[in-house]
Amino acid sequence: MYVCHECLTDSVVMRRMQRMTKGSLEQYLGGEADRAIHAFYDALPGLSRSEWPALMHGMGYNFEHYDALFAQVIANLQMALDDCDYTARHRTVQLALLPFCSEYGIELKHDLQHNHRHLYADFFRAATGRALPERYPREQDNRWLAVSRRWASRMRDALVHRSTGDAERARFNLGYYWAIEHLSIVEMDTMRLAWNALGVQATYLDAHCAVEEDHDAYATRAVLAFTTPEDEVVVRAIRAHEADLAGYYDELTAMARA
Ligand SMILES: [Fe+2]
């Protein structure tokens, strides 16, 4: 049940985390995204190398678009200022900012690092021998980019969540955000193994695998600073993102196998 009116402190978050040992947020996932991610990376070796530049440019759109989604989540949390307590709101935004900053090479207690887009460009060059284009073309010639754009747009629309109020939208955004971060662990691990097996090594792959568990932990604490692990809006959002991610990878797999 939603308890935004409570004055939430870290001890409240800790109590909620302890309660979660009986059933974490992970229990709301059905395994569809895991299946779809593995199916795509199982199909990747069968794809012609001549397709790699278009594929990686398209998938790069999807990865970069998550940065925009994180910004949207944080904006929607902060926009709930008429509808919930400042203690919960600010603690949650603080926790949600950490994975977001990480995408830009900003990590606690570290000097400024390369942002992940810069690392993705290195990865693109290592795999294809070409420079990552600065812009995504408006034309729909690249089918991998077209499908990435379509699913990115669907995810962005999900966060708009035309609901009854700003706090409910914020809770939905948090659940969706948690699912993005949590599913990124298996997504990045599987991606690194697949590309390494194809002879492609990249700091982008290693850097993501190194931080995703921390991102997941921050995302979990962000959810618990704002609401309870049983919040049905959060549960709905977790399932919505899992379905979107599975849908995206299923389309990629069908294209890779065609
Ligand atoms: Fe992440």
Image: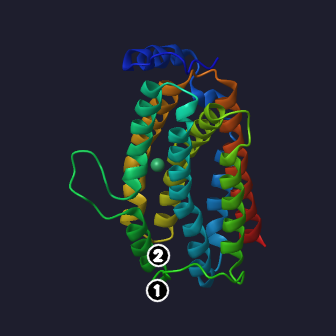
**176 or 71: nearer the eye?**
71
Indicate left or right for 48 with 123 as reference: right
Indicate left or right for 106 with 99 as reference: left
Instruction: Name the residue beneath numbered marker 1.
Output: 130
- Vertical placement of residue 224 versus 204, above or below: above
The amino acid type found where label 2 is placed reads Phe
Toward which corner of the image does residue 239 lie, by quadrant? top right
Instruction: Tell me the colour scheme of the image.
Output: rainbow
Residue found 56% across the figure and 80% down from its top: 53
**171 or 34: nearer the eye?**
171
- Give the percent coordinates (x, y) of residue 128: 49, 82
Q: Secondary structure at mark 1?
A: loop
Farthest residue to the front: give it: 82
The amino acid type found where label 1 is placed reads Arg
- Vertical placement of residue 48 versus 7, above or below: below
Residue found 58% across the figure and 78% down from its top: 136
Q: Does residue 30 appear in the picture of this structure?
A: no
- Give the percent coordinates (x, y) of residue 59: 59, 67
